[in-house]
Image (cartoon, helix red, strand yellow):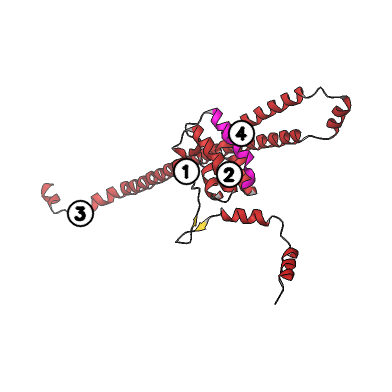
Amino acid sequence: LWSGSRAASTHKRTPSLPGASRRGAAAMGKAKKGGGGAEVFAFAIDLKSVTQMKPDQRVKWLSKACRAVADGEASVKHLFDVLSNKKLVNDFHEKAGQRMFRILKDNLYLFSEKQQRFLSVESVLAMEYGDKVDKSDEEKGANDRASTGGGDRSGASESSRAPTSSDAASKMEEMMARCRDFVRQNANTFDDRQREAAETERLAREAERKAREDQYKREWQAITDWHVQLEPWGTSCMERVDERLPILA
C-alpha cells in the first residue's frame, strides 16, 4: 500500500497534456448520437428556415451558426450546404450581402480547403458580392495607409522593405477577384458552347429528316417509272384474255 505522501507526489508528477482542458471543454459541446445512430446537434441548420428569415436576420444567423460550428454544436456539412445554395440570397439587398460575405470570409477556416475555394470564389455570395467587398476593403486599406503615412522616414523605409499584412490581404483579395472573373467567363463560355451544341444537333436532325424524305421521293419515283414501262404490256395481256373484245369489234 502506498502512503498518502507517495500518492500525492505521484499525482504531482503526472504530466498534463497541452490543450487537454480545451479539448475536454470542446468535447462537451460536440454532437451526440441519436437513437438511430445519427448525430444530433444542439444548433440545427435548415435551409428552409433560413430562407424564411429577413436578409438582416440571415446575416445574424450566419454569425451564430459559425460560432456553433466552431464550438462543435452544429454541423459544418449542413452549414456548407446552406451557403452553397442559391436560395440563400433571395430578396437580398447589397448591404446585407456584403456583411454576410465578410462573415463568411472571417470563418472560412471552419471548412476544408476544397470547400474554402468554392465558398470564396464560386458560391453565390462570392459571385454576387465578393468583388464589391474586395473593392471596399481595398479602398478602406488605402485610406488607412494614407492616414498613417505621416511617420518618420526610417519607419517609411522599413515598411517599404517588409510587406505588411494589409498588403498580403489585398493581394489575396485581388487574386480571389481574378478567380471569380475567370469562373464567370467560363460559365458564359459554357453556356455558349451548350447553345452551339444544341443548335448543331438541331441542324443535324433537320438534315437527316430532309435526306430521308429525299430518299423516299427517289424510291417512289423509281417505282412509278418502272410501273409506266409495264403499262403497255399489261394492257395487251388484258386485251388478249378479254372475251368481250371480238364481240365489240
Residue at position x 86%, y 24% in the image: 152
Disc 3 on helix, strand or loop? helix
Of residues 196 and 123, the one nearer the viewer is: 123
Q: Alpha-carbon distance for marks 2 and 3?
A: 107 Å
Decide which of tag 4 and tag 3 comes sooner along the chain. 4
Circle 2 residues within 10 Å: few <14, some 14–19, many ≥20: some
Residue at position x 83%, y 31% in the image: 159
Disc marking residue 130: 4
Decide which of tag 4 and tag 2 comes sooner along the chain. 2
Task: Name the residue tied to disc 1.
Answer: 47
Disc marking residue 113: none
Q: Where residue 175 appears, x then y in whole percent?
A: 70, 36
Q: Where residue 50 appears, x then y in whole percent?
A: 47, 40
Q: Is residue 199 visible from the viewing direction of this image?
A: no
Left or right relative to 9: residue 223? left
Q: Quadrant of residue 189?
A: top right
Disc marking residue 67: 2
Q: Where residue 234 appears, x then y in whole percent?
A: 26, 51
Between label 2 and label 3, give the one nearer the viewer: 2
Left or right relative to 239: residue 28? right
